[in-house]
Image (spheres, helix red, strand yellow):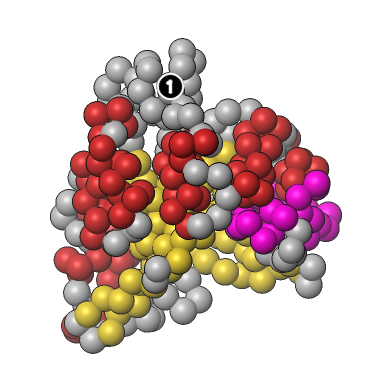
Amino acid sequence: MTQSDLSLERSKPGERFADYCLWDYHPVAPPLGKLNSANLLWRAIEASGQGAHLIAACKALREGLGAGRTVYGVKKFGERLSFEFYFYDYGRLERRVSISRVAEILAPRTTLPLASLEKRPYFMFSLDLDEEIASRRRPLEVVNVYVGNPGSSVSSGICYEFTDAGLRLANFYFFFDARKEMDDIIAKTSCSAHHDLRSFPLSRILRPELLDCEVVVVANKKVNDGIYFSRIKIDTLIDFLDRERFPADLTGFVRRHRDNLDHMLYDVGVDYQVEGADVRVLKSAFYGLL
């Protein structure tokens, strides 16, 4: 299925605008009739060489949960694109969006690892989908489950990988106000077991153009660190896609439709390793609403 087969989706009255934490925001320009965020997902799927089964799974999620209830991430590893989908329900034990609910929606296309997690206070979970998983040619083996971190003076979350073998600790995420907590952002980014502080290239990670955002998230992971910039504007997104060498067709689409995408705010991030005074990007990603 090509982009020409998928009509461009337009913002409608009552359209939801939310960041990758599913926190609502007001659009920064009049949105009516402009493109919605799902257009970038469809274009990225096309650029990845995947197609009908993955698109059908995405549309099933939107139909089953409702528009604006699923966050997607387009992740780039080297030259390869992959797709992660995030599901939030801050009701926790009173949640309506649960692992079992998403498993039910995706049941015709894939099977999720399941156990009795519904009485545990997760507020979010995510899973990766691709053409092989969505067509049952390969099983979906991991669901990422997120819980809060009470007692921390910084808003934070803990991620566990959930498989048929059980839970294992994966990542920690820490949220900072980009305008009010820059000293803490610098301190947290610099404090890592993965690099030598004496040669730490801070400006290569906290890039000035990306710091014109609202929230910075610092992540500590098993073999690397991550940094995420929430609620950037369209021109910063285009620069990010160029710098991280996302497929030219995708970046060109965003550039051509810049004036039809300028009403939204965007979220981006990278996973990286520090090698001496150099930064090696392992993964880059942008996020949107389905």
Residue 192 position by quadrant:
bottom left
Horizontal side, residue 199 vs residue 286: left or right? left
Question: Which residue is nearer to you in this view: 47 or 259?
Answer: 47
Magenta-tinted stretch: 107-135
User: Which residue is at a point 42% across and 75% down the rendered structure image?
Assistant: 224
Q: The N terminus appears in which quarter of the rendering?
A: top right
Horizontal side, residue 54 vs residue 105: left or right? left
As displayed, is residue 19 above or below residue 270? above
Q: Is residue 45 visible?
A: yes
Q: Secondary structure at mark 1?
A: loop
Q: Which residue is mark 1?
A: 11
What is the tally of numbered marks visible in this picture? 1
Q: Residues within 10 Å of mark 1 (few under 14, many from 20)?
A: some
**Magenta-colored segment: predominant secondary structure:** loop
Please tell me whether residue 249 belongs to the stretch shown in magenta: no
Horizontal side, residue 58 vs residue 274: left or right? right
Q: Is residue 174 visible?
A: no
User: Which residue is at a point 63% across and 57% down the rendered structure image?
Assistant: 131
Residue 155, given in percent of the width and then of the height, sits at: 44, 50
Residue 190, given in percent of the width and then of the height, sits at: 28, 71
User: Which residue is at a point 66% across and 71% down the rendered structure image?
Assistant: 168
As displayed, is residue 69 above or below residue 182? above
Amino acid marked by disc 1:
Ser
Residue 120, given in percent of the width and then of the height, sits at: 74, 51
User: Which residue is at a point 38% across and 17% down the rendered structure image?
Assistant: 33
Residue 124, given in percent of the width and then of the height, sits at: 61, 47
Horizontal side, residue 272 vs residue 55: left or right? left
Q: Residue most toward the right?
A: 116
Residue 96 position by quadrant:
top right
Please tell me whether residue 123 belongs to the stretch shown in magenta: yes
